[in-house]
Image: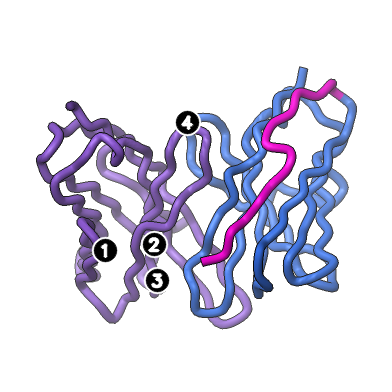
Amino acid sequence: SAVISQKPSRDICQRGTSLTIQCQVDSQVTMMFWYRQQPGQSLTLIATANQGSEATYESGFVIDKFPISRPNLTFSTLTVSNMSPEDSSIYLCSARQSNQPQHFGDGTRLSIL
Amino acid sequence: GESVGLHLPTLSVQEGDNSIINCAYSNSASDYFIWYKQESGKGPQFIIDIRSNMDKRQGQRVTVLLNKTVKHLSLQIAATQPGDSAVYFCAELIGGAGSYQLTFGKGTKLSVIP
């Protein structure tokens, strides 16, 4: 199964700033995703990161707030822009190769002061 | 809208006993289901999956049962160990090739009593 590495693993940021989270997969994968998980809650899909084209965002999430890049089949970034305390959460990268189960990184724990 | 949910938010079991975690889904179009285990400070870890053309699948100490008639999914853990303590999520996959979404249930916290 694919091994997914995220960095940073955690960060504390000032409101109004932006943070870019990196996700590296150890093999080429068809699809990559970004999820958000509030403490003690379930996972919510933010967007599907499409290689070579704009990400597909879920309802409630917009590109201006969460710009995503996917320059190749093993790497993606998620930026949390103009952060506010409400953005404090765990952000998880996920990847799936065709006909294989979807796997997750260990997440980035983000706190905004 | 249709969703995936769980009957019990918390479950405490004695070490060595069997655990059963339940999940109800409402989307009859779902054709693939996954159980994940999430330990504190980590991402969800794949445990076992099952397709809608099956009603049972077994792994190492784990069994997933799918009852499409009542739209119910369960995860059975045999001889539960302290290392099984975690939050367990069921997830359903809807869609065709090139376009699908993995939707997660709310999660069940399993606590194993030594």
Q: Which chain is indicated by disc 2? A: B
Residue A29: percent from the left, percent from the top? 65, 72
The secondary structure type at the circle numbered 2 is: strand
Residue at left 36%, top 48%? B5
Check whether the beta carbons of the residues at disc 3 and disc 2 lie within 8 A of each other.
Answer: yes
Q: Nearer the viewer, residue A64 or A7?
A: A7
Q: Is residue A111 above or below residue B17?
A: above
Task: Check disc 2 and report the residue beneath it.
Answer: B34
Chain shaded purple: B
Q: CA distance from mark 1 to mark 3?
A: 12 Å
Q: Which chain is indicated by disc 1? A: B
Residue B3: percent from the left, percent from the top? 43, 55
Q: Quadrant of the C terminus of chain A?
A: top right
The kind of residue on which mark 4 rests is Gly
Task: Check disc 1 and report the residue beneath it.
Answer: B71
Check whether the beta carbons of the residues at disc 4 and disc 1 lie within 8 A of each other.
Answer: no
Residue A39: percent from the left, percent from the top? 53, 30
Residues in magenta, as a range: A1-15
Q: Which chain is indicated by disc 3? A: B
Local crowd size for mark 4, using a 10 Å CA cut-off: few (<14), some (14–19), many (≥20): few
Q: CA distance from mark 4 to mark 1?
A: 25 Å
Chain shaded blue: A
Q: CA distance from mark 4 to mark 2?
A: 20 Å
> Are both tags, 3 and 2, on one chain?
yes
Residue at left 12%, top 45%? B18
Task: Check disc 4 and report the residue beneath it.
Answer: A40
Magenta-drawn stretch contains A45: no
Task: Check disc 3 and report the residue beneath it.
Answer: B32
The kind of residue on which mark 1 rests is Lys
